[in-house]
Amino acid sequence: MMKNRLRLLPMSQERAFEAVYETAPLLVTENLAREIVDFVSATRDVAAGPTAESVSEGGELNVEPALLSLVCHGLNEKRKAQNKTAFDRELLSCSKESIIADFYHKSVADMPPRVRRFIQEELITDRGFRKPCYVDDAYTRHGVTDHQLRLLVDRRLLRMEPYRGTERVELTHDLLTGVVREYRDRERTRRQRKRVAAFAALAVVLALSLFGVWYVVSEGETDELLRIQAEWNAAQAQKQGQQAGSNAAKADLQRFNAESLAAQANQSKKTALESAAEADHERKVALAANTATKALSVQQPDLALLLAAESTRNADAAVGLSSLLTVLQSYANLRFFIRDHTNPVIGLAFNGDNLISADTGGTVLTHSNEGAQIGRSVVDSPGLPVLMSPDGALLASAGPNRIQIWTAGGRKVQEI
C-alpha cells in the first residue's frame, strides 16, 4: 500500500475496520481495531466541519487508506521493537503521536530548508489547520521543484488535486497538522534565536568597531585633540579676559562718571558757597553803607561814632572807614585819641574831670581832659568782661563762678 502510486480513495469506517482487524486478527483485538480506526478518522478539521470527501453517503466519517496504513505500519514496528506479541492500548496511546512525527521527519529529512519552510508556512494556517496552495505558486514563489513535490506525494505526505483547470497541493490528512505545526513553531523559535544571536553579534562587532575607532582616535590623535582643547581653552580664556577688560572699562567709566558728578556737585556747592559769601558780603557792605549814612545824619557824637564804628565792623569797606573819619572830623570838640591800650577797650567812664578806660587785658588807664595819661593800674582778671561805674571809681569783672569788684587803682574790693 505504501508503494502504490495511484491515489487511494477514502474508505468508510467499516471498510477500514475490516482492513485492520481481518488482515491481522492475531495482532489486534476487535475493540482495539475500532480505536485505531477512530483515531485515524476523528482527526478531521472540526472547525471547518465535515467535507463531502470526509463523509460517506450514510453520514459516516471516511478514512484515508494511506494514513491508516501508515498508523498500522508504525504500530507494528513499535510492537516488534518492544517484543510484544500483539497490539495493546498502551502501545496505541504511547505510539500514535510519535508515529506521525516519525513519518513527517522521515518524509522531509532529505529535503532542503526551503521545502520544509514551504510545508510549514504555506500548507497550514497560523492556527494549525490545513490549507491548499496552488502548484504554480509552489514552483515560482517558494522555489519548490516538480521533482521534490512529486517525491513528497509519493511518500504520502502531500497530495495534488485538480482545481478549476489547475492543481493544488496540500497535506494528505489533518492528522499531520499537529506535527507540522510543532516543527514550524520550533523552527520559528530557532530562527528568532538566530536573529537575536546575529543582532547580539552585530552589536558586539559594532561595539568593538566603535571601541577600535575610539582607541585609534585616542592613541593616534591624542595630540591633535589636546591641541584643539588647548586652543579652545585659550580662546575661552581670551574671551574671558576681554570680558573682564570690558567690565573693567565699564567700571572705570562708571567711576569716572561718578567722580565727574561728584566734582560737579562740589563745584556747584563751592559756587553756591561763593555766591552766598558774596551775597553776605554785599549785604554787609550795604549794611555798612546804610549805617554810615545814619552816622552822618545824627547830631549826637557818641551815637554817630558808634554807628560809624559798626559800619567798619560789618564790612571792611571804604565807605565805613570814610564815614568814621568824617564823623571824627565833624566834631570840633573831639580833643584826643586814646592810643595807650594794647588790647580792645571794653569799658569807658567819665567822672567830669578824667576819662577812665579798661581793656580786655585788665589794664585800666586814666586820662585828663587834655588827653594826658595820669594813671595806670592792672586788674587781675585778664580776658574777663569788665564793667565800669558811671563815675569810674569802681570796676566789676565777671568770670566763671565769680564776680570781682575793683577800684580804679587796681585794688580788689570784693569777690562774689
Image (spheres, rainbow, N blue to C red):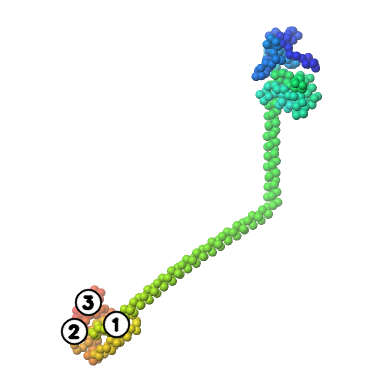
Residue visible at 27% across and 82% down in the picture = 294
Q: Position of residue 164 (x, y in %)?
A: 75, 21
* Sequence-wise first label, 2 or 1: 1
Above or below: residue 70 compared with residue 314 = above
**Marks 2/1: CA distance?**
32 Å
Identify the disc placed on residue 391. Answer: 2
Which residue is identified by label 1?
Answer: 293
Instruction: Give the x, y percent position of residue 45.
Output: 67, 18
State the quadrant of the C terminus: bottom left
Name the mark nearer the viewer: 2 or 1: 1
Where is residue 19? Give x, y as percent.
74, 10
Which amino acid type corresponds to the residue marked 2 in the rendered image? Answer: Asp
- Alpha-carbon span between mark 2 and mark 3: 20 Å
Label 2 Cα crowd, 10 Å radius (few <14 / some 14-19 / many 20+): some
Is residue 102 among the parts visible in the rendering? no
Q: Amino acid at mark 3?
A: Ile
User: Which label sits on residue 403?
Assistant: 3
Mark 3–mark 1 Cα distance, whole angstroms, equals 40 Å
Nearer to the camera, 271 or 182: 271
Question: Counting other residues with Cα less than 10 Å from the Cα at mark 3, is it few (<14), some (14-19), or many (20 or more)?
Answer: some
Instruction: Give the numbered dot on residue 338.
Output: none
